[in-house]
Image: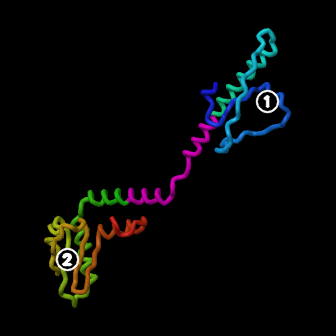
């Protein structure tokens, strides 16, 4: 039975424990590292002719086996409870934010570009710039430039393959204005706490 006992645990003779009148003393589930393990005294010979001694020995054996089994179950339960610790909320939040941003980016990249919607985006960007600034250029993705060929804009249209489809950038002599899917994705990243990095 000693091969079933966990470290720091030694079975005791029930008859000897009952004979001691020292009161109840609970054992710690985590014994001190510097405390030596208790020394087990050898079991006394059981008189096979005495039915009481045989019954007592059998009862002691059953009690020790039940105690050892319960001890193993308790240690397994404690190990399982330790495994149920909460995940760090910052790491979990970062994982969720990254997953949401990746899924939305995949959806946006797979969605077809509607020519009417793209024209409305271009017209909105053009309306934001004063007519006095004649140095205006509308930059779009090359695939989107094809959709704007028939659009009645008084702007030069250039294509930039680095731009996200569905995004328009209006450059003037004093700066630029960007509108569309790339801006929406950047706002999503900022809302999820990732900043402008990606």
Q: Position of residue 52 (x, y in %)?
A: 82, 15
In the rendered image, residue 64 lying in the magenta stretch gets the answer: no
Residue sitting at 80 percent across and 16 percent down? 53
Label 2: state its secondary structure: strand
Q: Position of residue 85 (x, y in %)?
A: 56, 49
Vertical comparison of 173 with 46: above or below: below
Residue 138 tag number: 2
Residue, far top:
49
Residue, far right:
21
Q: Main secondary structure of the magenta part?
A: helix
Residue sitting at 22 percent across and 80 percent down? 171
Residue closest to the eye, 36 or 97: 36
Q: Quadrant of the C terminus?
A: bottom left
Q: Which residues are magenta?
A: 73-100
Compared across the picture, whether 140 is left or right of 29 comes to left
Mark 1 neighbour density, 10 Å: few (under 14) some (14–19) many (20 or more): few
Residue sitting at 80 percent across and 12 percent down? 51
Q: Nearer the viewer, mark 1 or mark 2?
A: 1
Q: Position of residue 160 (x, y in %)?
A: 18, 70
- Residue designated by label 1: 17
Compared across the picture, whether 180 is left or right of 88 comes to left
How far apart, in angstroms, are the residues tagged by discs 1 and 2? 92 Å
- Residue 178: which quarter of the image? bottom left
């Amino acid at each position: 039975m000693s091969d079933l006992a966990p470290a720091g645990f030694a079975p005791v003779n029930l008859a000897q424990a009952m004979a001691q009148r020292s009161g109840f003393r609970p054992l710690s589930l985590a014994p001190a590292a510097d405390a030596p393990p208790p020394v087990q005294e050898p079991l006394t010979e059981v008189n096979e002719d005495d039915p009481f001694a045989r019954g007592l020995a059998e009862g002691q054996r059953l009690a020790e086996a039940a105690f050892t089994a319960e001890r193993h179950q308790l240690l397994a339960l404690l190990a399982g409870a330790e495994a149920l610790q909460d995940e760090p909320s910052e790491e979990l939040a970062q994982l969720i934010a990254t997953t949401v941003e990746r899924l939305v980016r995949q959806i946006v990249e797979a969605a077809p570009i509607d020519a009417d919607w793209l024209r409305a985006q271009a017209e909105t960007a053009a309306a934001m710039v004063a007519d006095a600034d004649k140095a205006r250029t509308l930059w779009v993705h090359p695939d989107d430039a094809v959709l704007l060929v028939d659009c009645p804009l008084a702007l030069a249209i250039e294509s930039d393959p680095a731009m996200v489809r569905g995004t328009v950038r209006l450059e003037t002599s004093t700066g630029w204005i960007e509108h569309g899917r790339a801006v929406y994705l950047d706002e999503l990243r900022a809302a999820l706490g990732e900043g402008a990095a990606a």
